[in-house]
Amino acid sequence: MDFGINGKTAIICGASKGLGRACAAALAEEGVKVTLVARTADAVEKAAQEIGRATGTETVAVAADVTTDAGRAAVLAACPEPDILVNNAGGPPPGDWRSFEREDWHKATDANMLSAILLIRDVLPAMQRRKFGRIVNITSAMVKMPHEFLSLSTAARMGLTGFVSGIVPSLAKDGITINSLLPERFDTDRLTSNISKLAERNGISIEEQRAKQEAASPTGRFGRPEEFGATCAFLCSVPAGYISGQNILLDGGSYPGVF
């Protein structure tokens, strides 16, 4: 399938590793000029170089914290009018919600809700002028299956989900789509960290906790980042232009509901 996005430009946040990097790689394979964003300069520069060499596509690395005005300005200076925006931020720490203070909730909403909303606001005018835009928000399966251990993440990401739902209809005639990808148990550093915390909480080894979580999936395994990246690239394609306002769950068939 020709995705029709060769030569277009994209900003991918949280792109130095994990699911963000997988999205950047998948878009670069389609000929998209990708701007990778992450807070750690060495890591994001290395990721950009490796993806550029592997795909032969132009890549740019920006070390910035998109929760700040200066960070978002730096990203938009590197890629002022992107055709594609992928919002992504590492989730806040898991734990007992009773132990979180006001500052913890502020940090979670800054990273996982407000930074995405502000970037969407900033990139929309050019997308509307060109009559084309693709925005993908990487949220979490917890949007559909909330868990108290991940309450910080769930609350912030559900706030972003509700916001997006409200603006999607007004952008449809401009050829702009906004969708969210809801990952569960993909084999990333974030998952490894959560497994470690759960193992400690449950009094078992990390290996036992990992095996337990793999067995809980109908597939008997964790998702692969490249599978996630491919889904993101399709949502950013021209053929996906009639898909908008959706929350697409990537969980290997774990979700027990219908909607």
Image: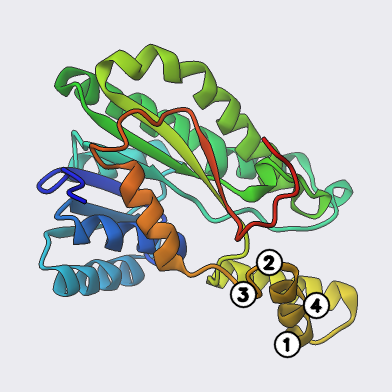
At x 17%, y 18%, the residue is 129
Circles 4 and 1: CB atoms closer than 8 Å: no
Give amino acid for label 1: Glu
Element class at badge 1: helix
Distance (Cα) linking label 4 and label 3? 18 Å
Give amino acid for label 4: Ala
Element class at badge 3: loop
Circles 4 and 3: CB atoms closer than 8 Å: no
Please name whichever residue, 46 or 42, is drawn nearer the observer in this view of the structure.
Answer: 46
Distance (Cα) linking label 3 and label 1? 14 Å
Q: Nearer the viewer, mark 4 or mark 3?
A: 3
Checking the image for residue 207, the label placed there is 1
Answer with mark 4 or mark 2, whichever residue precedes in sequence. 4
Answer with mark 4 or mark 3, whichever residue precedes in sequence. 4
Horizontal placement of 197 versus 139: left or right? right
The residue tagged 3 is 221
Give amino acid for label 3: Arg
The residue tagged 4 is 199
